[in-house]
Image (tube, rainbow, N blue to C red):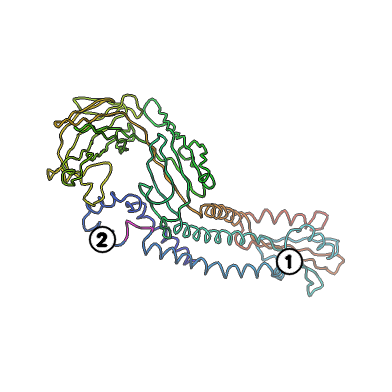
Amino acid sequence: MRTALILLFLLALAAMPGALLPQRSLNLPRVNDYIAAHGWWGRLLDRFEFFDVYASVWFSAIYLLLFISLVGCLLPRTFDYAKAARAKPVLTPRNLSRLPHHGTATTDDTPEQVLAAAKTRLKGWRLVERAEDDGGRSVSAERGYLREAGNLVFHFAMLGLIVALAIGKMLNYEGQVIVLADGSQFCNSGTAGYDSFRPGLRVDGTDLDPFCVRVNSFEAKYLPNGQADQFTAKIDYQAGADLDADTWRPYELRVNDPLRVVGDRVYLLGQGYAPTFTVTFPDGQSRTQTIQWRTVDPLTLLSEGATKFDPPGVTDPAERRKRQIAVTGLFAPTAQITDRLLTSVYPDLRDPAVAVDVMRGDLGTESGRSQSIFEIDRSLVDDGRLTRVARENLKPGGVITLDDGTRVSFDGVRRWVSLQVSHDPTQLWVLVCALTMILGLGVSLTVKRRRLWVRATPDGEGRTVVRVGGLARTDQAGYGEEFNRIAAQLLSPRRVP
């Protein structure tokens, strides 16, 4: 038990870096920024896996040792408890007056009558009656075996919780995806459909629970000061046989009220805006895109982003890289423009506007390197391969005409919602183990293990001396009052002190 307590303390201590330092699985950019800002210290922490605490070798070792220690602690205690549960109460002590609780009285009843009354009063206790050497008789009674049972239940539930969490770590997965709230769909068919995906140790993304979600609309309510009041996404979903029958079932998805389907949970995490731009090229061909922009101010939903276009009909890669277009800048749902600087003063769509830079040249989309959808590669701007050809503030319907006749129009804006899909097959077992731990702990703290003895001995004058003694196995708090009540009934007033 001492070893288990030390390991439990070490587990809590080892978890502290996970709360104090950014974790790679949650926020990779913050980890990279931390390492860059702290130099050798950041690199040292990274070498010892302080940015991957819960997947580190040392945290897993403590976790495994705690599991082994609990098993080694519980098995012998369980056998001892099973043996004690079958054993008879211990012999009556020779001198009951030396116990913490005791009492004596004289009665005209026979020893048999005294013990019969004692056994009736001690109904529910574990009893054994024995004959004494001096001709008397005694009853040994014991109660409170549930205390140790509650303690064992608590620790076995803790063991089950550790096992359930470990299995969940291997089999769970969690992914986030942004879906336009205009009837766009998302299907949980593979990792390619997610914007970010965190698999468990035994999940490769090829056997996800199949279901589809269609986001029809999104409604946001705000307080007058701009604080969010309520978010509601009206969605349809299909799973199981509905996929074959192409049947959609409606559901209103709200924050902290997930959709539960085929063992997965779909959460509504957030929302934002996706401006729609149309680029009409000099030959008359046009391209229209609606791409989500990233929220930079959670209070006013001021957003930034980059919508990228390839020129149509250009097959020469070198020529295409010279004529690619990106519309970058800021979007404000309720715009306020001061000295041509755009900002947002309210999160709802009251007066939308964009402040855009139109960039032309090589966007780097054919370089083979990953690239954020929210921004352009600034190194291409520094090299002169991507240049700004226009800057303007636009309201919906506004148009920018470039020097070569290309027209860029701001057509409007749509809402997007951020969804999170979480899968944890051991979630129910974690809940059951946690509730069982509370139940076991409650029993262990409220039930007291106590013993009581009654001895009835003839005094040689036709009367019987009754002696009562009590002892608490673990602590004496609260047992004195219970013993006094029992002793007062066993040493009744009609008996002579």
In the image, taking residue 203 as reference, residue 350 lies left or right, namely left
Measuring from the top left, give residue 347's x and y in whole percent: 34, 30
| In contact (CB < 8 Å): disc 2 and disc 1 | no
Q: Which residues are magenta?
A: 49-54
Cα separation between marks 2 and 1 = 65 Å
Residue 16 is situated, as x and y percent measured from the top left of the image, at 37, 55
Residue 140: give its label. 1
Q: As drawn, is 14 to the left or to the right of 125?
A: left
Is most of the magenta stretch helix, strand or loop?
Answer: loop
Residue 126 is covered by the magenta coloring: no
Q: Which mark is residue 44?
A: 2
Residue at disc 2, secondary structure = helix
Q: Which type of secondary structure does the marked residue at label 1 adopt?
A: strand
Between 203 and 22, the one nearer to me in the picture: 203
* Residue nearest the viewer, comparing 383 with 367: 367
Q: Residue 384 bears which disc, if any?
A: none
Q: Depth check: 89 or 274 in front?
A: 274
Q: Residues within 10 Å of mark 1 (few under 14, many from 20)?
A: many
Sequence-wise, the earlier of marks 2 and 1 is 2
Q: Quadrant of residue 221?
A: top left
